[in-house]
Image (cartoon, coloured by chain):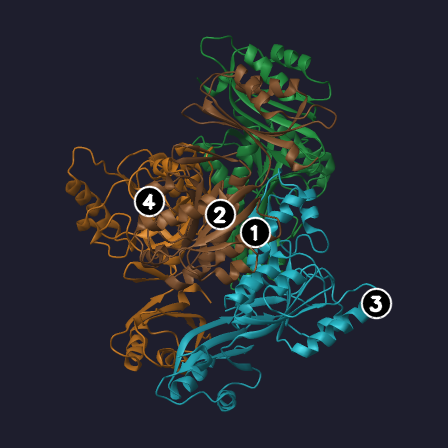
Chain colours: A orange, B cyan, C brown, D green
Amino acid sequence: MADSDKHILLMDGPDTKGLIYHVTGVLFRHNFNIIHNDEYVSPSGQFFMRTEFEAGVTHESINGPELLDELRSVIPAGITLRLNPKKKKNIVVMVTKEHHCLAELLIRYAFDELDADILAVVSNYNTLQPLVSKFGIPFHYISHEHRTREEHEEAILRTLAIYQPEYLVLAKYMRVLTPGFVNHFPNRIINIHHSFLPAFIGANPYRQAYERGVKIIGATAHFVNNDLDEGPIIAQNVKGVDHRHTAADMATEGKDVEKIVLSQALKLVFNDRVFIQGNRAIVL
Amino acid sequence: MADSDKHILLMDGPDTKGLIYHVTGVLFRHNFNIIHNDEYVSPSGQFFMRTEFEAGVTHESINGPELLDELRSVIPAGITLRLNPKKKKNIVVMVTKEHHCLAELLIRYAFDELDADILAVVSNYNTLQPLVSKFGIPFHYISHEHRTREEHEEAILRTLAIYQPEYLVLAKYMRVLTPGFVNHFPNRIINIHHSFLPAFIGANPYRQAYERGVKIIGATAHFVNNDLDEGPIIAQNVKGVDHRHTAADMATEGKDVEKIVLSQALKLVFNDRVFIQGNRAIVL
Amino acid sequence: MADSDKHILLMDGPDTKGLIYHVTGVLFRHNFNIIHNDEYVSPSGQFFMRTEFEAGVTHESINGPELLDELRSVIPAGITLRLNPKKKKNIVVMVTKEHHCLAELLIRYAFDELDADILAVVSNYNTLQPLVSKFGIPFHYISHEHRTREEHEEAILRTLAIYQPEYLVLAKYMRVLTPGFVNHFPNRIINIHHSFLPAFIGANPYRQAYERGVKIIGATAHFVNNDLDEGPIIAQNVKGVDHRHTAADMATEGKDVEKIVLSQALKLVFNDRVFIQGNRAIVL
Amino acid sequence: MADSDKHILLMDGPDTKGLIYHVTGVLFRHNFNIIHNDEYVSPSGQFFMRTEFEAGVTHESINGPELLDELRSVIPAGITLRLNPKKKKNIVVMVTKEHHCLAELLIRYAFDELDADILAVVSNYNTLQPLVSKFGIPFHYISHEHRTREEHEEAILRTLAIYQPEYLVLAKYMRVLTPGFVNHFPNRIINIHHSFLPAFIGANPYRQAYERGVKIIGATAHFVNNDLDEGPIIAQNVKGVDHRHTAADMATEGKDVEKIVLSQALKLVFNDRVFIQGNRAIVL
């Protein structure tokens, strides 16, 4: 059975008794197979459930809108329901000059390991054009020079409008985005920050890390909201360093952490495993 | 509401459609609160579910035998059901001469962090008697000298019979137990092995690790079955080393890993979070 | 040869050509064995060397003051030289109410694994007196109630004056020390902070970590200077968490990290392996 | 000053008093700058030293053969001395069908982060030819079909003879090499094995890991000698898994570990930081 026959049901809202019972009852009556089912109830009483299921081979196929209606009829009104067919996401990647995260995504994409299609790469420099061209993906060089921040973002938005990406991945895009821009993609922009947030917010985190004399460096993949480096954290990882590492050494070592953490976070997001609750990411 | 009002339902058996639906239905009709619910279906089609629930404050209390009967009536016969009130386990700890794992357990027990009561400590040496006596716990020195292996184990079994422990924890007990002994405690003996199993099975793993020149050492907490160091693995952890570490240095560094891994594994087991499937531990 | 026959030479100062050559030349002419020799030159040109050596069995014993004079005669004046016999340090441990770090130190001390003698424990609560008394170590309960901060610190200083410790270990001492107090022990106070500094400076780091939704928690052992949580970092470690961990769960999980990191940092300090350069700890 | 002006002196042999003194004396008299100096003496009395140094700007340049002669005149005959200018190594990469390690090396090479030049890629399948061709590197498809093992290796050796590589990197080359082949490249073949050696030697380590139910998987970069998976270990790393990971999931997760560990190991080897002592790698 192909992935396209699989669906993912996402529910979140105030917890009440019987939510699992009622929802699994609907799937049971349709004779659907539950492949994975994960729930979480937060200390504040918020319920989250991700159910991956499929129609049995000899049974009815999945009619999304009808199924959603039926599910809505058995659960309280305050619960949000989403039903996604299991499929690759469409994304655009934004970069500046550093190649390591972009290259990681390109290689995974080229070998069908990304759970997404890279529609295009957008950059404020043309440095990485040769790399991107190796993979036959459109590269849009949109310089920020001689443009106001708003003009620059407008130009980017015009390009993005061509591709209509579901997610925007900032793979070392080194400019701060305005709230105006971010609001176009609510919970749909993922950034990799080169520190173990919330340590070393802002510019030059490895320089800050060196000066503070930390013994571990890290990287953080997070959703972008309107506060710099403050959105919900999806994944983090770290690596030991010592006094022998200069800030430049830390940056070099850190790249390996950054690219892997970003890839791990994208895998979670692209498989519909991440819910957002306030400033926290719930990963089921 | 005290822990004693909470119950844990454990189910495992061949997966069929509707298991979650039927079980949560029973709990829903009794008006019980599901606190945590975790399921897993193995690739071979085995279903596992752990449901932590409690009776609501104004509602009926939980009658275990009746509830089990009712649950059995809605699920297929091949499913194993267990219903445990949430409470501390009773354990006996067995040791030889090394103190670090035992001390870790004693301190956690003394500060009510073990999820278990240590009824007694049994050792084939009296080395650790002074440590145990600080904590007011019975210490049984049962030497293996001048006894056959069977006589020694018989003596231990007579002592264990006094305490009737639910679990036996081998906190660096350095003698191999016979199948005859192990059979008295099926899936109820937990051992800490001082290597990253299956590397370095058997004696002197740090010496073996040194000679092999590994760059990481580890420790493994596992259930004991009749094959030495071969039972289901509950938890593992590791630590980096380098060529400067002698075998003795590795043993010293390894102790920190061993005691924490053992504690983590016990926490999982004592909270009824571990199922056994063949030679694998399923941790929900 | 006992540890007392071993010495550790510590050098630091501006790098110039020939420092290793001149110093090893002196040791060579005395026929001393170099057991370990580690150097580091910082990017700013500061030289650090730690040399562990011993007199050969049939040769002259080590006369510290004479040897220091001789070494000073072959190196530039700006280099700081220290010569320590290899031996245990004398320490006092300060705590508040949490037991886990203190217990770790007491157990290591009881089994001669601490590289230090715990002369006494000082606390602003009497909560941990029963634990300390098990190990036969003086416990000084010096309440901060009905005292100004200065009066409280004066009382502590009077007690410390009895013991003359080389190092003060803050094993979860939850009060901020004044600069006046800290100045009595320059680079001789070691603290364990329950976060991955510089993230979550100050109070309630696990609460902060929970609210920020981090995926990794950590602990930091550092020297105390006059800025809260800002002294040179000696050791750090981390542990993965997820959205299921409440702030209380993080605190519980974090304890295992805290106590091991503190022990590791103390081992480094007590073996004269830590130099301080500005706000950075150089570990050789 | 360019890297080409830097040299690396490598010494190993039986430890005797004064080795550091005599060698640093020669460098001091030539007015050379020691940039890094690392030593290690094994418990069995073997001395290892790696000294990175450079000629001062206004001073004599480094005459390798003369300097080696002079160094040999001040140290015992049993010590091995090597003097390498600091420069990139020439390598050939061998692969089968999996792309992840090769792609990692190609990207690093393309962005000058590998400390080596990839002269060619050799494979027993043509699967990865399109990837390699993106980077303008010769790809030699040398099928093992219709050839005996010896004929196949002969064909590979003829191709390698064209390039005369200093190192051969097996980036998931899935065939066992004969001793006859290995002997052509003593301590010059580096392999990545997809397990935490010595666990799961041989074929299908992730399948083995799944069946054993391990909670951590790993990867090992090691030199190849004549015993399969038994050569000196250069670097290892690990990643947590749980019962939800199938063998295929483990393989997917493991790829991220494999490619990073291989890169780390190569960085060490290509910077002349790895000595071999019996079956152990000493990394200075």
The mark that comes first in sequence, 3 or 1, is 3
Q: Amino acid at mark 4?
A: Thr
Q: Is residue B160 left or right of residue C133?
A: right
In which image quadrant can residue A12 be found? bottom left
Q: Amino acid at mark 1?
A: Val
Same chain for mark 4 and mark 3? The answer is no
- Residue kind at label 2, given as amino acid type: Val
x and y percentages locating residue B19 in the rendered image: 47, 80
Residue that mark 2 sits on: C92
State the mark number for residue B238: 1
Say whether residue A114 is visible.
no
Foreground mark, 3 or 1, reads 3
SS category of the residue bearing label 1 = strand
Residue B103 or residue D2, whichever sits in front: B103
Above or below for B272 versus C38: below
**Residue A29 location (% of width, % of height):** 40, 83
Helix, strand or loop at mark 2: strand
| Mark closer to the observer (2, 1) | 2
